[in-house]
Every structure is written in structure tokens, then in C-alpha cells.
Image (spheres, rainbow, N blue to C red):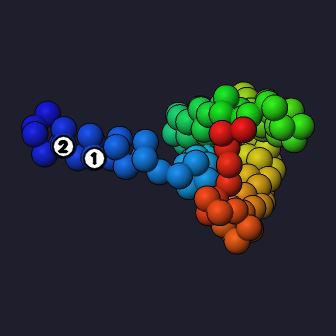
Amino acid sequence: MNNIQTGAGMYQQTAIQSMPPDKLLIMVYDGAIRCLKLAKEALDNKEFEAANKHLLKTQDFITELMVTLDMSYPIAGNLYKLYDYFRFRLVQANVRKDVEPVAEVLGHLVSLREVWIQAAQAAKKTSPAGGLDFAG
């Protein structure tokens, strides 16, 4: 690896670490949605190895959403159960090579992403800090 690649990686890592929590959350949703779209396309084309790769990556994104929940908020328990259900459906999709669970989870993630964007915008209007407080 050359110095340019190392520097670019360090820059990206620093940029992510200094990013506001609401932007990081949207990035995780974006990654999950992108991978699910690729998984759906791969399943449609009977490219099962690629579908498996994208479904596993989506499960990683959903796990990240689960482990970063602040369980001191009552809604966190409900979100945890919902994310766990998403992972379950993606396992079913992968085992059965079925696009229907992928489409279901994709629809939910797109909707949730929009809700989080709206919540972040509302928080910026009402919070002196200008964003969602994920610190608890």
C-alpha cells in the first residue's frame, strides 16, 4: 500500500469519527439500502454468491444499528426488535434465495431512513446544539 492510499484511509477514518451522530446513522442506513438493492438485483439474476455477499453486508449494517441503540430510551427496545426481525428476514431470503423478504426489509429501511432525516431536521430547529442527542 502506498502513502497516498494510507493517507486517504486515515482521512476517511478521521472524517467518519468527527461526523455528527445523526449523519453517521444516515450513512449506515444508506449502506444497508445500497447493499439490499444489490442483493435484490443479484437474486433476480440468480447470482447467488453475490446475493449472499450483499445480504451478509446488510446484516452487518443492521447489527451496527442494533449495537448503537441507547437502551435508556423506551423506543430503543422496539427498534431493537424491529432490527432483529430484519436480520431474521434477510437470513430467510439468503437461505431460500427469495427476493420477497429483501423487498420487505428494503421498504422498511427506506421509510425509517426518512423518519430519521425528518427527526434530525426537527431537532436542528429546536435544539441549541443543532442536532439529535444520541449520547443519552
Q: Is residue 96 above or below residue 119?
A: above
Could you tell me which quadrant the N terminus lies in? top left
Could you tell me which quadrant the C terminus lies in? top right
> Quadrant of residue 79 in the image?
top right
- Residue with the most extreme front position: 128
Q: Residue at x 34, y 43 (%)?
A: 14
Q: Which dot marks residue 11?
A: 1
Position of residue 96 measured from the top left corner of the image (x, y, whole percent): 75, 32
Labels 1 & 2 near each other (Cβ < 8 A) = yes
Q: Residues within 10 Å of mark 2 (few under 14, many from 20)?
A: few
Q: Please, what secondary structure does the residue beneath circle 2 have? A: helix
State the residue position of label 2: 7
Instruction: Calculate the distance from the C-alpha at mark 1 to the C-alpha at mark 2.
Output: 6 Å
5 or 46, which lies in front?
5
Could you tell me the amino acid type at mark 1? Tyr
> In this orientation, does residue 110 appear?
no
Q: Residues within 10 Å of mark 1 (few under 14, many from 20)?
A: few
Q: Residue at x 56, y 55 (%)?
A: 23
Q: Is residue 89 above or below residue 35?
A: above
Position of residue 118 measured from the top left corner of the image (x, y, whole percent): 74, 66
Could you tell me the amino acid type at mark 2? Gly
Q: Is residue 129 above or below residue 36?
A: below
Position of residue 134 measured from the top left corner of the image (x, y, whole percent): 67, 44
Q: Please, what secondary structure does the residue beneath circle 1 have? A: helix
